[in-house]
Image: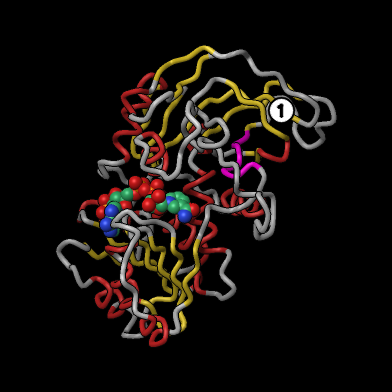
Amino acid sequence: MKALELAEFGIDKLRTVTLDDPQPEAGQVLVKFKAASVNYRDFMIAEGMFAPVEDLPVIPLSDGAGEVVAIGEAVSELQVGDRVTPLFFPRWLSGDALGDERSVSTGLEAPGCLREYGVFDESAVVKVPGHLSAEEGACFPCAGLTAWSALATNPDQSSKGVVLVLGTGGVSIFALQFAKAMGATVIVTSSSDEKLAHARELGADHGINYQSTPEWGPAAKKLTDGRGVDLVVEIGGTSTLPQSFKAIRRGGHIAIIGALGGAQMDLSVYELIMTNAHLHGIGVGNRTGHEAMMSFVDQNRISPVIHQTYSFADAAAAMRDIAKGGHFGKLCIRF
Ligand SMILES: NC(=O)c1ccc[n+]([C@@H]2O[C@H](COP(=O)([O-])OP(=O)(O)OC[C@H]3O[C@@H](n4cnc5c(N)ncnc54)[C@H](OP(=O)(O)O)[C@@H]3O)[C@@H](O)[C@H]2O)c1
């Protein structure tokens, strides 16, 4: 089978290789990939910025979708023809991952989706709802599940209140779609008025341009009549967290997801004391969450927003473009 592989860091180093066709063993399924999607993490891994990546070569991309084309013995839940996505963490099936459940992730320690075929334990893939194309299904394992975990794993009801979504990338647009389907009022920030208009078409109640309104935290709070937002979907880190504290309501919930604007910062404990805010670190999610998300997506007929689809041969362009930030939603690859 053909695969795209990185034997050294740098997206330009992505090379086509021919590997042995994999065969499923007992309890495993053989998946023929039809599509993949790109996350910011994939760009970081390829460029050697995702610490510490030592075990090259790697087949990139955590997110893909395909069809089961063969099954091993003792496979009970899946059959040939089922459309599936791999889990981001193939060993993290449920619970809090207190052991080594997160030591293997797709597209890093385990081969990613830029290949024609993959063999997976039956428990490491989840069925794709029928209304989704392969490209749409390929958007969920990392970006979708991360947004889902930010909204659905809260102990409180903040995802039904006012949700502040930062930026308009893959995770954030899923968060917008999920939060609206959960009944939330959603405020979106973006560097682009055009993207904010697009977010409103998708159901966003308010938009704030974080470049023309650098004090977007107080601006978001003002939109809640001074009460503050219930939940922030935090993807910026250093550059955004100070404003997120200005936006949050007392006792609100900040889902810490990404660090597009830096990871290190001075943080006064008084920010937490004065706001009573709950900071919740998110690490994608487990199989239980993935299944719950897919069921929610099915019930609510949610389809991911795909900005652009590339060919398999052009996968490197998709991986480069994610870092340019021009997209709204997801960048996909069709095989
Ligand atoms: N913890 C986890 O489990 C997890 C899982 C997935 C992703 N992540 C992280 O979450 C972040 C987003 O991932 P993604 O795949 O959704 O990325 P993405 O699709 O590349 O999103 C990029 C968008 O974020 C916005 N943005 C960029 N820099 C910003 C800044 N300094 N302040 C505010 N907004 C900014 C921009 O939106 P506009 O163009 O609208 O301005 C940009 O288009 C990344 O850091 C990624 O590594 C973490």
* Whole-percent x, y for residue 110 in the image: 58, 34
Q: Does any portion of residue 173 appear in the rendered image?
A: no
- Which residue is painted at 42% across and 21% down in the image? 312
Q: Is residue 19 left or right of residue 179?
A: right
Q: Is residue 6 above or below residue 256?
A: above
On the image, the x and y values in percent for residue 333 come to: 42, 29
Q: Is residue 292 visible?
A: yes
Q: Is residue 236 left or right of residue 280?
A: left
Please tell me whether mark 1 sits on a helix, a strand or a loop: strand
Determine whether 73 is above or below 154 in the image: above
Q: Residue 279 at x, y = what percent?
A: 47, 72
Residue drawn at x 41%, y 33% as measured from the top left: 332
**How busy is the neighbourhood of tag 1: few (under 14 within 10 Å), some, or many (20 plus)?**
many
Mark 1 close to ligand 1, CB under 8 Å: no
Q: Is residue 89 magenta?
A: yes
Tell which of 168 and 265 is nearer to you. 265
Label 1 is placed on what type of residue? Val
Range of residues picked out in magenta: 84-90
The residue labelled by disc 1 is 29
In the visual, does 94 lie left or right of 182? right
Q: Residue at x 67, y 31 (%)?
A: 120
Q: State the residue in front, 316 or 208.
A: 316
User: Is 46 part of what is drawn in magenta?
Assistant: no
Q: Residue at x 64, y 41 (%)?
A: 90
In this view, which residue lies farthest toward the right?
Answer: 74
Q: Quarter-wise, where is residue 322 in the image?
A: top left
